[in-house]
Image (spheres, grey):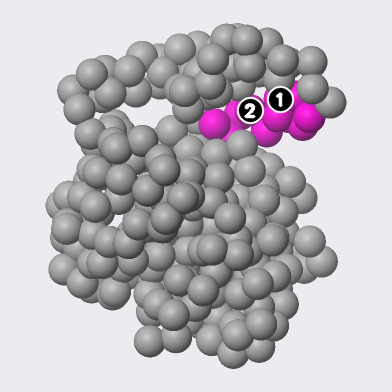
């Protein structure tokens, strides 16, 4: 990240941009930095000006207590102002929930696209999310960052053997370093249910995407988003999972953002 701006509360946000044309800001999800969406940015920058940034509490960006979802919306507002005063947003996973909140909050946003924002689609899933929130809060309060990462990986559906292997990975230290930001993504997701009233207030076009190789509930959540916004469209990408391939996703986003 080669540039910095200050958010409303003074938090330093690191970002970079590439390409020319209409501006698109990419919003990463949990356990991610702006670098996570860099491959997608490289493909979109052939047609647009693409901005990636490290959300607060991760990467090269700063942080400030106490956390509130409103601070992250203010971060996006400051970033959009710095790059021209208007932008489209793309958010992946819980980053999609943040992008949708920003659009509902009246930020100068032209379009919003989201990929597999993981809203719960059953009462059992909502109960699981509530348990996760309780256990995550306790783990972070007690400084058990590794346990917090484990909780998140378990929530995503990874098996215990895979999680044990992850702990031995050279990437584990980096995951622990941004573990406190898991609480931020959890807050952005609210209680985990589809926020239909908030979505109904969004007036710009919204494209909600899922991979057709992802679990049925993930596709259902993406479809529910599209159905809850006044100008929503649902799209399923053939053969894709939550780890969507940039070469498959980029043309779909480019078509939508060019409208």
Residue 218 coordinates in the image, percent (x, y) = 33, 40
At x 68%, y 11%, the residue is 164
Q: Which residues, given as a range, are shown in magenta?
A: 171-182
Q: Residues within 10 Å of mark 1 (few under 14, many from 20)?
A: some
At x 35%, y 57%, the residue is 236
At x 15%, y 52%, the residue is 197
Is residue 141 at least partly visible in the picture?
A: no
At x 60%, y 61%, the residue is 246
> Viewed as shown, does residue 158 lie left or right of 198?
right
Question: In the image, is residue 155 above or below residue 119?
Answer: above
Residue 237 coordinates in the image, percent (x, y) = 41, 57
Question: In the image, is residue 51 above or below residue 7?
Answer: below
Q: Are marks 1 and 2 in contact (CB under 8 Å)?
A: yes
Name, please, the residue furthest toward the front: 239
Looking at the rendering, in which quadrant would you find the C terminus?
Answer: bottom left
Looking at the rendering, in which quadrant would you find the N terminus?
Answer: bottom right
Residue placed under numbered mark 2 in the picture: 179
Magenta span includes 180: yes
* Number of numbered callouts drawn: 2
Question: In the image, is residue 63 above or below residue 78?
Answer: above
> Viewed as shown, does residue 189 lie left or right of 19?
left
Quarter of the figure with residue 187: top left
Q: Residues within 10 Å of mark 2 (few under 14, many from 20)?
A: many
Residue placed under numbered mark 1 in the picture: 176
> Viewed as shown, does residue 145 lie left or right of 112?
right
Spatial separation of the CA atoms under disc 1 and disc 2: 5 Å
């Amino acid at each position: 990240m080669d540039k910095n701006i200050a958010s409303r509360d003074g938090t330093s946000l690191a970002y970079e941009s590439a390409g020319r044309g209409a501006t698109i800001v990419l919003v990463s999800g949990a356990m991610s930095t702006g670098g996570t969406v860099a491959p997608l940015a490289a493909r979109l920058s052939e047609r647009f000006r693409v901005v990636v940034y490290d959300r607060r509490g991760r990467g090269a960006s700063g942080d400030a207590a106490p956390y509130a979802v409103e601070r992250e919306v203010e971060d996006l507002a400051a970033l959009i102002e710095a790059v021209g005063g208007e932008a489209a947003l793309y958010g992946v996973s819980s980053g999609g929930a943040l992008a949708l909140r920003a659009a509902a909050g009246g930020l100068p946003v032209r379009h919003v696209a989201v990929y597999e924002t993981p809203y719960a689609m059953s009462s059992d899933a909502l109960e699981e999310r509530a348990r996760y929130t309780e256990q995550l809060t306790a783990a972070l309060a007690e400084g058990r960052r590794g346990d917090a990462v484990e909780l998140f990986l378990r929530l995503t559906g990874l098996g215990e053997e895979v999680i044990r292997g992850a702990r031995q990975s050279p990437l584990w230290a980096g995951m622990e370093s941004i573990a406190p930001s898991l609480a931020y993504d959890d807050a952005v997701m609210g209680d985990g249910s589809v926020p239909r009233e908030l979505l109904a207030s969004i007036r710009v076009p919204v494209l909600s995407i899922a991979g057709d190789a992802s679990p049925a509930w993930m596709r259902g959540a993406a479809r529910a988003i599209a159905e809850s916004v006044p100008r929503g469209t649902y799209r399923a990408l053939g053969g894709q999972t939550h780890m969507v391939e940039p070469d498959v996703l980029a043309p779909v986003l480019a078509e939508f953002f060019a409208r």
